[in-house]
Structures are given as C-alpha cells and as structure tokens.
Image: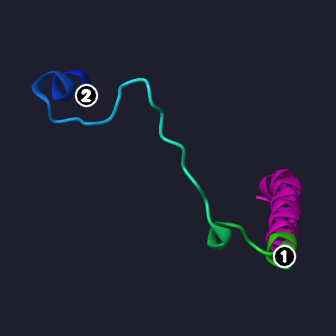
Amino acid sequence: MLRLDRVLGFCTVNGSERPRPRFGDSASEDPQTTAQTLALLTQAEAALTDTKGRMPHRLAEE
C-alpha cells in the first residue's frame, strides 16, 4: 500500500527514511513509582504462589 502511495505521488517522504520516535520526559516514570510498581508485582506473585501451594491441600480435603 505504501509503495502504491509513492507511485501515485501521495507520499512525499523518501522510502529509505525511517521514522525516529522521540519520547519526552512525560513517558518516563520517576524511580519511586517504578519501585512501587515492582513491589506490587512481587507481592502479587507471592500471593499467587501461596494460592498454588494451598490448592492441592484443598482438593485433598474435598
């Protein structure tokens, strides 16, 4: 589709040029927010592991 646009003259950008995205300061989080997110993920993983460990015991009781 992009080739067709170039052939028909709709595209003014050279095909060999690649876009270079730029991320501003708003895209990066502060270190404290990142640390809190990682701590929450670790807690969720621990809760999941605990639940998985209890499942065989719960099934055996039934």
Say the numbered circle drawn on residue 2.
2
Look at the image and give the residue range highlighted in magenta: 36-62
Please name the amino acid that badge 2 sits on: Leu
Q: Is residue 37 left or right of residue 5?
A: right
Left or right of 9, for residue 2 = right
Along the line of sight, the residue nearer the viewer: 7 or 56: 7
Q: Secondary structure at mark 1?
A: helix
Amino acid type assigned to the residue bearing label 1 in the image: Gln
Residue 25 appears at what percent x and percent y?
A: 67, 70
Q: Main secondary structure of the magenta part?
A: helix
Q: In this rendering, is residue 14 above or below 47?
A: above
Please name the residue shown 86% across and 69% down the image: 43
| Residue that badge 1 annotates | 36
Lateral position of residue 4 relative to residue 34, left or right:
left
Q: Residue at x 48, y 33 (%)?
A: 18
Q: Residue at x 10, y 26 (%)?
A: 8
